[in-house]
Image (tube, rainbow, N blue to C red):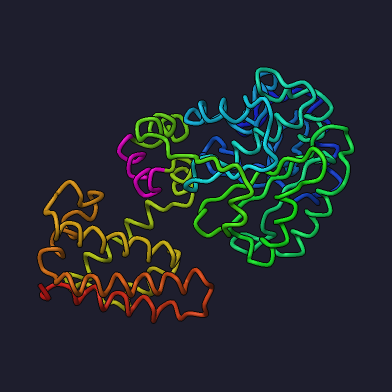
């Protein structure tokens, strides 16, 4: 059988039939895979298309991306920078009751957790990996494993509710239906509010039976100390720049090396985040923003015109870039290091503003940007156009205040 998406290909017929038959009736499960597809290489969350000679079938693939080489697929893709980390975690003679995988977003922590989950649930693991063909693996692939539970926000950027955690606690106290382990995945842990986190504490401290909890966090500093202290903490570091670029060479073959480097820089070194930025057209959005900033400083375009023209660029992304530029200005003012001027598209602008602006004014604008960014993150009811106009008026006023 041939699959449309590169990251799930040549799956055995019995596996495809099992998954398809369990999903044709409805898409009830919210658990899904994040896959990198061919074509534009989008990060795909949720819907996976399988092609057959006569028709297309659509279903939700559950939480596991990959599997074994006997499937010739990438379920829970084994990223090259995770090789030693995987050996360290999966090779344990005895597993802890709870792990906290923490590190920057976009480096594959979720995939690592799913891969470990598959191995823990598998009845006949081979060389630390799930076999892919036992009953447990097939149930997991079909999204119907009775001893597997995934807790995540019901909607993107929403908190994990306390009622969701209570449902999880009810699952943890039950006996494993297949006589083995129960495995729980929570991601992102910081999405839980204080009440939800407190509801989880008892399960973290004394999980019922042979239960393993896998917690994934992109911002461990936001977690309660009581949550962190009940887990074996496993740091997941950023891959090296060269390793990330090598991987992006395969993930984004249509991009030049310079474009891949730019995407990786914009993603703060996270390769999976770089692919997501490419998918979202962030390079094009940044080009529009940079062009507007240059015209603003040359008085060729007004703040109002730019604010209206940037309506499709996410506010958080806008504030992130302006905050980064203000940081680069301050760094150059203190070091005069031209290597620290950032990406080439804004190097001359950053250098110009550093030479023409007072440090106190740059710090003032940076503080203002951070405050507004916090409001955006808290979902405050903001007037987007007025907010951007205020930002741009301050930015245009930087030169001449040195």
- Tell me if 289 is positioned left or right of 33 in this view: left
258 inside magenta stretch: yes
- Part of the protein shown in magenta: 257-269
Residue 99, position in %: x, y? Answer: 63, 42
Tell me where residue 106 appears, x and y as whole percent.
49, 45
Q: Position of residue 158 (x, y in %)?
A: 62, 64
Query: Which sits in the foreground, 188 or 65?
Result: 188
- Nearer to me, 215 or 372: 215
Q: Quadrant of residue 58?
A: top right
Q: Is residue 307 above or below residue 73?
A: below
From this viewpoint, is residue 234 visible? yes
Q: Quadrant of residue 362?
A: bottom left
Report the front residue among 206 and 47.
206
| Vertical comparison of 383 with 337: above or below | below
Quarter of the image with the C terminus in it: bottom left
55 vs 221, left or right, is right
């Amino acid at each position: 059988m041939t699959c449309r998406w590169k990251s799930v290909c040549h799956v055995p017929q019995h596996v495809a039939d099992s998954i398809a038959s369990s999903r044709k009736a409805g898409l009830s499960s919210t658990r899904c895979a994040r896959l990198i597809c061919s074509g534009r290489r989008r990060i795909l969350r949720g819907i996976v298309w399988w092609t057959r000679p006569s028709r297309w079938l659509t279903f939700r693939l559950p939480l596991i991306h990959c599997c074994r080489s006997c499937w010739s697929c990438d379920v829970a893709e084994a990223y090259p920078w995770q090789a030693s980390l995987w050996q360290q975690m999966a090779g344990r003679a005895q597993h802890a009751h709870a792990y906290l995988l923490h590190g920057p977003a976009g480096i594959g922590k979720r995939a690592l957790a799913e891969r470990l989950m598959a191995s823990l649930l598998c009845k006949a693991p081979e060389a630390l990996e799930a076999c892919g063909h036992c009953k447990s693996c097939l149930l997991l692939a079909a999204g119907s494993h009775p001893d597997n539970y995934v807790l995540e926000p019901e909607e993107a950027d929403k908190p994990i509710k306390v009622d969701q955690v209570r449902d999880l606690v009810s699952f943890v106290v039950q006996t494993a239906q297949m006589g083995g382990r129960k495995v729980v995945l929570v991601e992102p842990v910081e999405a839980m509010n204080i009440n939800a986190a407190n509801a989880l504490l008892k399960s973290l401290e004394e999980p019922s039976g042979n239960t393993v909890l896998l917690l994934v966090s992109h911002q461990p500093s936001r977690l309660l100390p009581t949550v962190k202290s009940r887990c074996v903490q496993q740091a997941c570091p950023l891959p090296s720049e060269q390793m990330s670029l090598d991987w992006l060479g395969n993930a984004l073959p249509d991009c030049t090396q310079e474009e891949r480097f730019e995407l990786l820089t914009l993603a703060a070194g996270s390769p999976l985040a770089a692919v997501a930025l490419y998918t979202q057209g962030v390079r094009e959005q940044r080009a529009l923003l940079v062009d507007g900033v240059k015209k603003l400083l040359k008085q060729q375009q007004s703040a109002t015109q730019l604010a209206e023209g940037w309506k499709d660029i996410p506010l958080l992304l806008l504030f992130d870039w302006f905050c980064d530029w203000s940081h680069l200005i301050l760094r150059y003012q203190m070091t005069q290091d031209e290597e620290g001027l950032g990406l080439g598209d804004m190097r001359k602008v950053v250098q110009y503003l550093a030479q023409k602006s007072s440090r106190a004014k740059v710090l003032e604008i940076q503080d203002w940007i951070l405050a507004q960014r916090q409001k955006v993150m808290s979902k405050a009811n903001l007037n987007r156009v007025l907010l951007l106009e205020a930002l741009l008026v301050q930015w245009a006023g930087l030169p001449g205040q040195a």
